[in-house]
Each structure stands twice: as C-alpha cells, then as structure tokens.
Amino acid sequence: MGIDRRTFIIGSLSTASLATFALSKKPSVEDLMTTKAVGNVTLVFTTDIHARTRPVYFAEPPNLLAPKSLEGTPGFIAGKDWLRYFHVKRGTPLAYVGSSTDFIENAKRYGKTGGLDRVAWIIKRIVEERGRDRVIILDGGDTWVTSTIALLTEGKAIVDWLNYVGYDYIVAHWDVTIGKEKFLQRVKEFKGKFISQNITDEDFGDLIFPPYDVREVGGVKVGIIGQSFPFTPIANPRQFVQGWSFGVKEDTLQKYVDELREKHKVNAVILLSHDGLALDVALAKKVKGIDVILSGHTHDVVPSVIKVDKTLIVIAGSHAKVVGRLDLKIDKDGIKDFSYKLIPVLSDVIPSDKGAKEIIDKYYQPYRDKLSEVIATTDTMLYKRDTLFSTIDVLINMAIVDHYGVDIAQSPGYRWGTTILPGEKITVEDLMDYMAITYPNVWIIRRTGEQIKAAWEDVADNVFNPNPFYQQGGDMSRIYGAEYELMVNAPMGQRIRNIKVKGKDLDPKKTYLVAVWGGPPPPAEILDPNFKPRPVYDVVLEYVRKIKHISIDPRPNVKVLDTKYRLPEEEFGKIRI
C-alpha cells in the first residue's frame, strides 16, 4: 500500500534551490519565495497549523517507524534518510524545516519558524503576483485548536485570521474538539467554505456540510472536494461529534468525483484532505479522476510532488513552518503542466503582515502577562515528535507521577507541540502549548498487567498497521515508569515484549495504578475513587514551578528489535547541556 511502481516522486526545480543553498549566505525573502510560475491556476495551502500564531521552534521527528511495506516511503522517512531521499543538503533552509538532522545547530542559524503574520505575508505576496482570480487558498485542518491562545479564545483568534487572509476552503479534525455547537458557530463565522464529503448524519446518512464546491479560476472550472479526518470519533472523544458519522467513504468520494466530471464538467478535481499521506496515496490508487490531493494530518514535509497514476499529491508540514504553492496549467482537457514550491517560513527572514499581527496581538493582550511568565529553565531540549519517545512527555509524566504516586503514567502520542531549546527560559505558554486541549483531565485507573499490555498492543496496531486504511494517526503513547521492547513487524498482539515496571517484569495478574490523560473519562468500574482528576496542565505547571530547573534523561525507554531506531542526539545534536 506504499510507494510502488505506479507511484513516482517528481522533483521540483523551485524547491531544489533551497535544498542546495549556500550555507555561508543568509537567505533572503527572494531566496525563499522565488519559483517558476506556471499556468493559469495557483493553489496556496497550509495544513496542521495547530493554531501556532507566533513563531516557534519545532523539531521534526528523528524516527518515523513503519511496517516493512511502508518503510522508506514519504511519510515514513526521517532525519538523514529524509535528506538523502529528497537530495537535500545538510544545513540548508529546506533541511531545517524538513529534517531533524542538526536541528539545534540549524535553529541557531535560522531562528524560529512560522508565525501567522508571516504566513499571511507570503500568501498575500503570491496573490499579488498571480492575481486573486487565479489563486485558491486552502487549509487542510487541525487549524483553530491545540494552542494556548486557541484554547482561551475557543478558536476565534484563528478564524479571524483565516478570514483576514482570505482562505477559500477548509476541512477539520481536532477543530471539532471545541464542541459541536461552538464548532458550527466557527464554521458559520468562517467567510470561506467548510466542505466535507465524509461527515454525515449517523441515523439517515445525510450530509452535514457541502461535499464539494465548483469554482471558476484562471479561466477554467475546478471542483474542490473536502475530506475531514476519517477517524475523528475514534481519535478524539465521540461526545464532540455525537450524531455524526465519519470514515474514509471512498465510494461516495468516487461518486462526487464523477458528479463533478459529468454534471459540472469541471476541468480538474482537487481533494482537500486530512486523511494522512499514506492513506491518501492508497486512496489515489482506488478512486479514479482526482487530479490533485492536498494531503494533511501526518505533518509530513515533502518537498516534491508524489504522483500516483495521474494524481498529484502534496503535503505541507505543520505548525506553519512551510506554505505550499502548486502552480497548474489547466485547459479543457485537464492539467498539462505544474510547478511546486514549499516555502520555508523562516521568521527572521519573512516580513510580518501588519494586519495579521494586529489580529494576533488583540487576542493575546488580555493574557499576555500570565502567558509570558517565566517559571523555569531547562538544560535539555524539550520536543514532542518521534514515533516512540519524547522528552516533553517524560517531563509531563514525571509531574503526574510526582502528584499522584502511580506506578505508570501514559501521555498520548499527539504530533503537535513546540520545541524548547536547551538553555532556554520556559514560560507558562511554552508548557501549555503541549497540553492545550478541551478535555485535559488526568484520570487514575486500575489495570492488570494483562490489560495494560493489551491496551498498548492496540495502540501499536494503529501506528504500525501495514494497511494505511487502518492507521488512525498519531504516534505511540509515551510510557513513564515502564520499559519495553518493540517488534514493529510482528503480528497484532505480539509487538510489545519484555515489559518491565520499575525494573521488574510486568505481572499479568497484578493490578497497577495507571495515570492517563488526553481522552474521555474512563468507565467508572476501572477508575480509582481515591484520586481526584485534575487538568494535566495544572499538574505540570505546579510541578515545574516547584522544581524550577528541568533536566531530562534523553535516552528512550523503548528498545526496537527489528528496525533501526535513532537516538535523539544522533539527529538533533547535543540536546542536554
């Protein structure tokens, strides 16, 4: 189901210049922006911004483990392997935004990335160059939630920004976790169009939102279909989408592609998707007639176009680190030529858009003093992304164990969060940005060793299933208080091995106290009534204020038996000073 003989990586000359950029030279705006303009239609797109309104550091994962059938394909390439695969030179702007290799050195060289005022400037510059009648502006979801300012404004700050920039289309995943009523309000406030062919009424199958839109652009007719995250009720509490049905729904997707072709006579079909890259590659092999897929969800920085049969697939990272630009030459017979550019959003190089900055500042103003309070320092780089392990989750779980005294603490394998460099001061917002969800409670449950292993095996099957249609996104849960071995390619139920809790073998019959968060309330029969649930960010902030200085052992507590697993310092550089 991965990249095979019908799937090709098509390099882009526009992005190639950034892949071989001279390290002695400081990049200019033109170095980052210049591209070969092609044709009559330009798609400008972002995805998985996760409401990162201001510039941040964000390290790409040192590992993206995968089953053999997907190993080494886009979406499952990290670090030095990513550099080799895409022919990107170490230390270049593209290497910085796309690979974990030399991250600390590159962060010092190039500074922070992103910032929605910078993204706005880039998009407005492209619109000015091409003309608004030739440009479609799209976002692939995970947009207005999961940052501190998004939590405090219930997504309103980001929706106002989307409207200011002039986004035309959007889909969703985490965005629904502000609650159905508030979500529908934000959709109504959005001046573009929310489209999704795969969200229907649970009882009757009626569409909740328009499945597609038809747009005249650049003298041709284009159909845009929306695809929100298919597994939203599984990955997030069902309460947020009660009464709605999700799913890949490839049959109805094919129906709408055909409808756009036959009824509306469009010249091209674009799928705005939050499926994840591997699933979109698999989907392109099953659904015929899609010209372009703008993929999202898996946060992949892919600087080249992936071509599956006649379908072009692109994906533009996360956390506003890059903006994607796809120029298309479209005539009555379809796409004849294209040019693709991933634009690194280097915050020290890209100018700030005044209007966008005013929107961001307006929403920050009431909370500025509280969020900017410095509460600690760190000698260890705190990061989130990796298939199995991250230092920020060690810190979060240390705080939970310190507060509750449990045997094991589990942190969810979310792919969002920022990076804090070693030696930096840490603010309230820095920490909150790892945990800014609307269901933050820590729950203490009683589980036998057998039940613990079964739960971890279930997560492993989601992460390492060889069929992309059964991968629901996210990385492995982070475990504190236990160690284990992993066989990525073992059958379901046999991947997790040799679990030790506090140095002793996991006892299948023994009952352990386990702390969990990032999900709905567990069933009453497994909850321990002696512990009061608290928001995870309260627990962590309280702990960090107490210890004042953070020092984390960066060695993972997982040993991978059947594939290469790089230690953090092999990629990032010296992460502990």
Image (cartoon, rainbow, N blue to C red):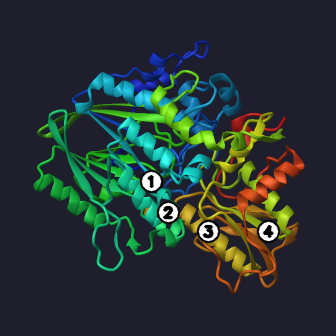
Q: Quadrant of residue 326?
A: top left
The residue under label 3 is 519
Amino acid carrying mark 1 in the image: Ala
At a point 56% along the width and 62% down the height, the residue shown is 464
Label located before the other in sequence (3 or 2): 2
Determine crowd level at label 4: few under 14, some 14-19, many 20+ residues with C-alpha closer than 10 A. many
The residue under label 1 is 278
In the rendered view, would you say 307 is above or below 88? below
**527 sits to left or right of 173:** right
- Report the Cα–Cα distance between label 4 and label 1: 32 Å
Tell me, for residue 408, which label it has, or none.
4
Amino acid carrying mark 4 in the image: Ile
Coordinates of residue 317 in the picture (x, y in percent): 50, 41
State which mark lies toward you, 4 or 3: 3
At a point 89% along the width and 49% down the height, the residue shown is 547
Determine crowd level at label 3: few under 14, some 14-19, many 20+ residues with C-alpha closer than 10 A. some
Label located before the other in sequence (1 or 2): 1
State which mark lies toward you, 1 or 3: 3
State which mark lies toward you, 2 or 4: 4
The residue under label 2 is 471
- Report the Cα–Cα distance between label 2 and label 4: 26 Å
